[in-house]
Image: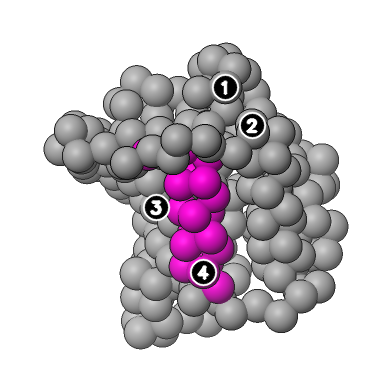
Amino acid sequence: MRLRRPAAPGVVLAAVLAVLALANLAESGFLPSWGPAGSLVVIAVLCGIVRWAGGSREDVGLGAGTVRRGAVWALALTGIVASVYLIGALLPLTRELFSDRLTAHLDGGQLALHMLVQVPLGTMLLEEFAFRGVLYGLVRRYSGTATATAVSSVLFGLWHLLPALVAPSARTPGAAHLPAGALPLGVVLFTTAAGVFLCELRRRSDSLLAPMGLHWATNALGYLTAFVLACLG
């Protein structure tokens, strides 16, 4: 049920940006971080803001009628990513692109923790719900699809700026396969472009599950591929 007098768009978007700014500061180490638990708290707050804005599950891409379609998209995209990684890892010319020195020290349990907890709860769920769910959905209600894609994608790129400045040699979650020495500007441009693509997946599938599936597969299967290559190496 929607509120009879939802909050004004400017106030709603300011509240969303304030919450995400605090979350970004925590992720970058400037505020205390609760890890995956903190992501769930942020998502709960964003859910409250959507309700305050008069929004619904459909606005964030989680309407009951879109779950099956979104799940099919997510499974298909996961299969495509897995195929690309497999082929890339098998070909000598591209194998090095899929290796990762940061993964070489992980054991099986740590790999599972990254793939099943850290990536979905610590990275993918928050970023997709915030940028392709809340921001995209609310801005689209207010100003249309093109504006929603632009706002969501640019802010998604800027979301990765501070972590890249703090640790410029580390691979940020949203750009897991950039070279380790990529400049912060490169990270922002890469993740902005990725944001556009993920927004288009959200539009075409009419479900948040599609970009969620691609986001998880890109990061989690990247860890798995690099781990296998390290073991074989």
Q: Determine the CA span between mark 4 and mark 1.
A: 26 Å
Q: Determine the CA span between mark 3 and mark 1.
A: 29 Å
Which residue is depicted at the point 72% across and 62% down? 22
Q: Examine the rendered structure and indicate whether residue 196 appears above or below residue 170.
A: above
Q: Quadrant of residue 150?
A: top right
Q: Earlier in the sequence, mark 4 or mark 1?
A: 4
Nearest to viewer (mark 4 / mark 1): 1
- The amino acid sitting under disc 1 is Tyr
Mark 1 lies on a secondary structure that is helix
Q: Earlier in the sequence, mark 3 or mark 4?
A: 4
Mark 2 lies on a secondary structure that is helix
Dot 4, how many residues are within 10 Å of its Cα: few (below 14), some (14-19), or many (20+)? some
Q: Are marks 2 and 3 in contact (CB under 8 Å)?
A: no
Residue 154 position within the rendered picture, expressed as x and y whole percent measured from the top left: 70, 32
Q: Determine the CA span between mark 1 and mark 2.
A: 7 Å
Q: Earlier in the sequence, mark 1 or mark 2?
A: 2
Which residue is depicted at the point 67% across and 54% down? 20
Residue sitting farthest toward the front = 4
Specify the label residue 142 is tagged with: 1
Mark 3 lies on a secondary structure that is helix
Which residue is depicted at the point 68% across and 49% down? 15
Instruction: Give the left or right position of residue 228, taking residue 127 as reference.
Output: left
| Residue 226 can be seen, yes or no | no
Q: Earlier in the sequence, mark 3 or mark 1?
A: 1
- Magenta segment range? 38-56
Instruction: Give the left or right position of residue 49, taking residue 153 as reference.
Output: left
Q: Which residue is mark 3?
A: 216
Q: Are marks 3 and 1 in contact (CB under 8 Å)?
A: no
Specify the label residue 9 is tagged with: 2
Q: Quadrant of residue 169?
A: bottom right
Instruction: Give the left or right position of residue 209, taking residue 4 as reference.
Output: left
Residue 231 position within the rendered picture, expressed as x and y whole percent measured from the top left: 40, 74
